[in-house]
Image: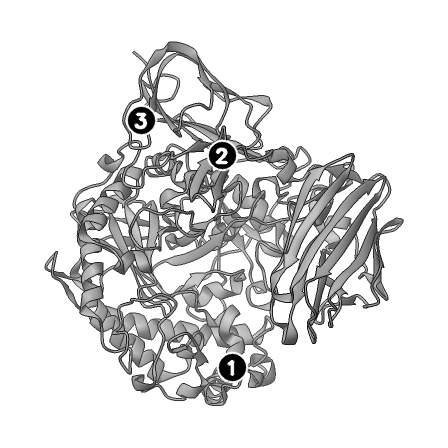
Amino acid sequence: MVRAFCALLIVLISTSAQAQWTVELTREASFIIRYDGATVVRAKYVAWGPDWKYADFKTAIGKNYNETWTITGDIESLNLGVTGQIASTKDQLVFKWTMAASKASANNTGGGMSFTVRRDAQVFGSAVPPPVIDGADWSWTPKPGQTIKVHFDGTSRASYLEPGGTSEIRSLFIPKDISAGESNVTMTITLPANTERRDGASKRYGEFDAGTWLAKTIDYTASPIDLSYLNDKPAGGRGFVKADGDHFAFADGTPVRFWGANVAAYALFNAENRAIEQQAKRLAALGFNLIRIHHHDSAEWSPSVFVKDAANTQQLDEKNLDRLDYWVKCLKAEGIYVWLDLHVGRPFRDGDGIDAFDELTPGKTGRKVAGLNYVNESITQRMKDFATAYLTRTNKYTNTRYVDEPAVMGVLITNENDLTHHFGNEMLPDKNHPKHAAWFNAMKKRIAAERGLDNTRAGQTWLPGASKVVLNQIEYDWNQDFIKHLRSIGVKAPIATTSMWGSNPLFSLPAQTAGDVIDAHSYGQAESLSSNPKYDDQSAHWIAAAQLADKPLTITEWNTEYPQRDRFTQPLFIAANAAFQGWDAPMIYAYQQSPLVPQTKIDPFGICNDPALVSLMPAAALLYRTQQVKPANETVVFAPGEDLLTKAISPDNTPALRTLSERHRLVIGLPKTPLLPWLAGVEKSVPNDSASLDAGSITSDTSELTRDWKTGTYTINAAQTQAIMGWIGGREIALADVAFDIVTPKATVAISSLDGQPIATSKKMLLSLAAQTHFTQQTSLVQTEPVIGTIRFKSPVVVEPLSPNGRPMGKLPAANNVDLTGKLATHWFLLTRP
């Protein structure tokens, strides 16, 4: 079933019966105030040296002694140590800081606390006034009779609202000129009556215990279970992948979906043959069938595809290209397809012959062109030249040109480089790009005249409206021209133009429809399972808002990266959403971007040795690739109509995009409009849909997926995957065929069928466990919290722990209960029935 919704008229949410105020302290020794579950005040420490040079203000909260917590911290660049305490009393928090300067420093911008307040009428039920500043103090009354007051002692610096809005208050109690010695500041926060103090996530997790947490649970060269049988070998054996409506298909019409990852930067080039072979096999065993080759051209990493010391970036480094070729050869042999980027971070150089080169943004080893390529023909030509050289090359290991390589399933023209939202402002006078601005203004004037737009408003690139027509048209025309070039040199793979990334509103979509697919990037935040979709977005909402009705959706970057403690909740969450929504190619960023050798620490963008993420990849791959979660019963078309261009519609400000995507399949219907004549258009209708979220949870229309933000949990209750994640400790959670009684406060526990049968009757299953990790710098030791508890089946199962390299560690007698003692250094157990 498909329904079309007019964005303006959609009504999904009933108000809750009784809202309440809560406050919690963070591990950084700051605080968060919530109203009805929505974050309305978030405090953080900030500091700057001279001329607003960023200074890292590090802080940490200590243990609780009779409702008093210690504070430790420092601002190293300002020679400042910080100690103190936080005391909690009825309706008040009192922060006391002692700042000790080892030596004097002058002309600093200063430091202190930043408070972000949320003036959201949807949260509070009516218009919300701005905060009131009174010297160093400030107050805010978002509802009559409910006031937050912040009072300072020990500072004479006035607080202020950041210019350009009234959402951020800065209280810089650290002076500009710091004298050697100690100074004291006190901050008293008075909260609305009956505010409930809740334990922050840090306290709920508990303390790291080096003696009981598990070490060496990941083998960098192996997978606990071999899922490579899911891959057709070699990749490309069924012909070129094509975009077929809103999904991918092989040449014979068989639908295909991809579970992927990124291999980037140093991992591409600092890699020996044996290591590449080994990692390609491991990737296939973990369940991947797609790898994106990324940061092949970026200045931030060396080596790259360009000759390092050449005067231009038109000379390709054959030695480094050889490494890429060998990667592709090995991946193809393992049945893993390849996604190629053309432009990521190329550092253009003096010898590249770029017009107005001096206007390009200076970078590490050259100049960057983000946004400027859309109006500068010489940049475009250099990008085309590279595409031709890069893609018409013959891989000496496969003896195939890349344009003729069926194992290449996708090509991205330019990474995170849109004109419509991020880089249109580069054309403004204050950006000091006069020649580029002149080229842009000529295009703008022509388009505005053709569409009957006001020329002045068409140039207000920071505002929705006429400017978004112009920016979309320029970007779309550029995309069409570049795609024409790619097809002319023989590219057969589906093409993406750029990505929906960095909070792109829906008005960025039209230009990207020139491509065969829409691509998205989305990164998650800690505690996202606890976010109330009435008020707050999370990463999956942004991905869903990029899905068009008639094109495949790829996700070339997603992650909730280290050091976010609950990142272990995300692999199965994203996989389940992807299966439910029908997304076509999620790719985590990244499998590895460091040199291709065993790692001694966790990289925020390298899951290869991160127990919290890589441990769950087999379960996630099984769920997604074998469709262990049902697709949505109903597809809802969100049709913004004329508001597409006149409003910055996004999951950040549109509840329907959040709630609909957790209940149904969500697609975006772009309108037919003479302003953007290439859009085919989607019919609008007035919805009659109302769904209460008062219960604190939301369930998919298949009844398989439930997110309970009040408890901070997510459950997958499907026939072949049954899993729980989030704050699952201390209570029983019963699913269709399995009951979980977990002691560990926050974890992911998943049961996956390995034989295609429902868990109720499956004779072979995989049990996967993951929880928080800890990295000890001094010893380079990565340890993971043991998952402790009991899992109850309705019929006996034989339990066989698997070592990090997949070797059996001995069978346990058949029983209905699986006892997780937390003593074995593993994340995986093979479960069998006679």
Q: Quadrant of residue 99?
A: bottom right
Q: Quadrant of residue 361?
A: bottom left
Spatial separation of the CA atoms under disc 1 and disc 2: 47 Å
Disc 3 residue type? Leu
- Pointer 2 with pointer 3, Cβ within 8 A: no
- Pointer 1 with pointer 2, Cβ within 8 A: no
Viewer-nearest residue: 457 or 274 = 274
Viewer-nearest residue: 249 or 781 = 781
Say few, some or many: other residues with alpha carbon within 10 Å of mark 1 (under 14 / 14 to 19 / 20 or more): many
Q: Which badge, 1 or 2, is on the more N-terminal residue? A: 1
Q: Nearer the viewer, mark 1 or mark 2?
A: 2
SS class, disc 3: loop
Residue name at image x 81 percent, y 60 percent: 129
Viewer-nearest residue: 492 or 364 = 364
Viewer-nearest residue: 525 or 783 = 783
Horizontal and vertical percent for residue 92? 84, 45
Residue with the mark numbered 2: 771
Horizontal and vertical percent for residue 420? 50, 70
Residue name at image x 38 percent, y 78 percent: 366
Disc 2 residue type? Ala
Asked if one can make out residue 298 in the rendered structure from this viewpoint, the answer is: yes
Q: Which badge, 1 or 3, is on the more N-terminal residue? A: 1
Residue with the mark numbered 3: 754
Q: Which badge, 2 or 3, is on the more N-terminal residue? A: 3
Disc 1 residue type? Met
Q: Quadrant of residue 737?
A: top left
Q: Which labelled disc corresponds to residue 427?
A: 1
